[in-house]
Amino acid sequence: MSDAVRPPDHAAPMLARRRRKPLNARTAEGHGWTEWLASAGFAALLALTILGPSMTSENYGLQSQIRMAGYLLISLMSLVALEPWRRPERLLVVPWPLLVGLGWCWLSLAWAVEPAVGLRRLVLTSLVLWSTFALVRRLDLERSVLLVRGILVITLVANFVVALTNPAVGIHPVNPSGFESDLSGDWRGIMIQKNYAGLTCAMTILLFAFHAERVHLALRVAVIIASAVFLYLSDSQTSQIMVVVSLIIGALFTWLAQTKGRERLAPAGLAWVLLAIPAILFVSMAINNAPYLEMLADPAGFTGRTQIWTALIRFYADYPLFGAGYGSFWDLGPTGPIFQYGKGWVTEISQGHNGYLDLLVQIGLPGTLLVLFATLVWPTQRLLRGGDHPVRPLAAAAFIFCLGHNLTESMLFDRDSLSQVFLLIALAWLWMATASDVAGMRAPRVTMPLAGRR
């Protein structure tokens, strides 16, 4: 540049101040802070879910309020992270089958025994469901898997530390209540109960067994062994059985992905058989419950669960279509339905120890079948369509584990219960991993578009 057109020296700082960053750099920075917010919200969701049972074991009123405030904050973080002011359709993150099942739960408040109690519980269920899908879909698959894996490892370490250094807290004392009185000596760590500890250990095993190729092999093996040891010491038999089943399912889908690639595995309509079986079972139970009650005649069967299931089946037989309404069966005091159908210690517990029976007595047969379609048929249909996404075996193993775990624990569509949240995460992974297979086109990116794109 000649002297005639070169700007004076004193103008250089002014030009430097006026020089702006490139547009793509600015939009990337804007995109980065919402990703950080989503990561923080997802980590907080996992932490609050894991600590939830312990938080509500004592001083229930205050702790419950703190818990609800935490989920409200997480929902707000999820909302901001989605940046709906740029694209309002980003708020539509929940698959329609889950919305239908959730909609029936809301409808059931119209005939609920305690609609106010049911409303509070259903608000929490809805917040957790939407926030989980919003955060998982806002993050890419790799980041969400990494965060779940990290939180579970921290939980595992904390469980070992507490159990070894403070056995009075980390190991079950003798339980005089009469239900599962053999808990003495079972390890629970920071969890309030051994079955919660067993569930987190089992999920840790699955997270390091599948889709963990980027983790050093020695670390993977060490975490799996440590989780298996704590799972054994917890004596959580349901988790022990289901983790073996889930490992087999995950290994099967890993093998199918390697041999068949993106080939369709089976007709998607085959998944309806999975709904037909419980539908026939539940209808026959409503028509004649005597054979089922005979099978549950042993009061000590399934560590006392048969006494709970007997009360639930009797209530369901009297109210098969609508039930008591969502959240209107347990923890209602002397006026609750359980006091009319159960006796003794059964009236003092807070769940039926079977997620499917608990849904039947709350939202009736139609609502339970809708929930089963959303959590069993719809995911299985997507799995049967084929595909070779590396997260598919992990998602399949996790969702099978959670559904099997509900055979002896009630966590299906139940607020922020551990198995429910892990099930939602698995379904979100599966939805993202199979989106292109269902649409029949090339897989789209699963990360959110940059803020500046239209």
Image (tube, rainbow, N blue to C red):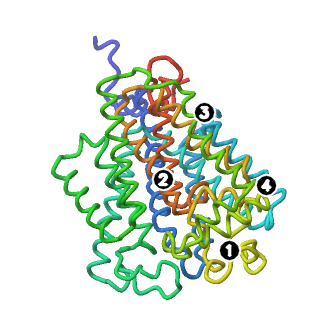
Q: Give the image quarter of residue 28.
A: top left
Viewer-nearest of labels 2 and 1?
2
**Secondary structure under the numbered disc 2 in the rendered image:** helix
Residue under pointer 2: 404
Residue under pointer 1: 331
Mark 1 and mark 3: Cα distance apart in space? 43 Å
Tell which circle, 4 or 3, labels the residue nearer the N-terminal end: 3
x, y percent for residue 112: 80, 62
x, y percent for residue 149: 34, 52
Task: Give the amino acid at mark 4.
Answer: Phe
Which of 410/159 is in front?
A: 410
Mark 4 and mark 3: Cα distance apart in space? 41 Å
Mark 2 and mark 3: Cα distance apart in space? 40 Å
Q: Residue furthest left?
A: 218
Tell which circle, 2 or 1, labels the residue nearer the N-terminal end: 1
x, y percent for residue 126: 65, 52
Tell which circle, 1 or 3, labels the residue nearer the N-terminal end: 3
Mark 4 and mark 1: Cα distance apart in space? 19 Å
Label 2 crowd (10 A; few <14 / some 14-19 / many >=20)? many
Viewer-nearest of labels 2 and 3?
2
Label 1 crowd (10 A; few <14 / some 14-19 / many >=20)? some
Viewer-nearest of labels 4 and 1?
4
Task: Give the amino acid at mark 1.
Answer: Asp
Task: Give the amino acid at mark 3.
Answer: Arg
Task: Tell me the residue at 47%/49% (across/down).
Answer: 37
Task: Tell me the residue at 58%/75% (across/down).
Answer: 63
Mark 2 and mark 4: Cα distance apart in space? 25 Å
Task: Give the amino acid at mark 2.
Answer: Gly
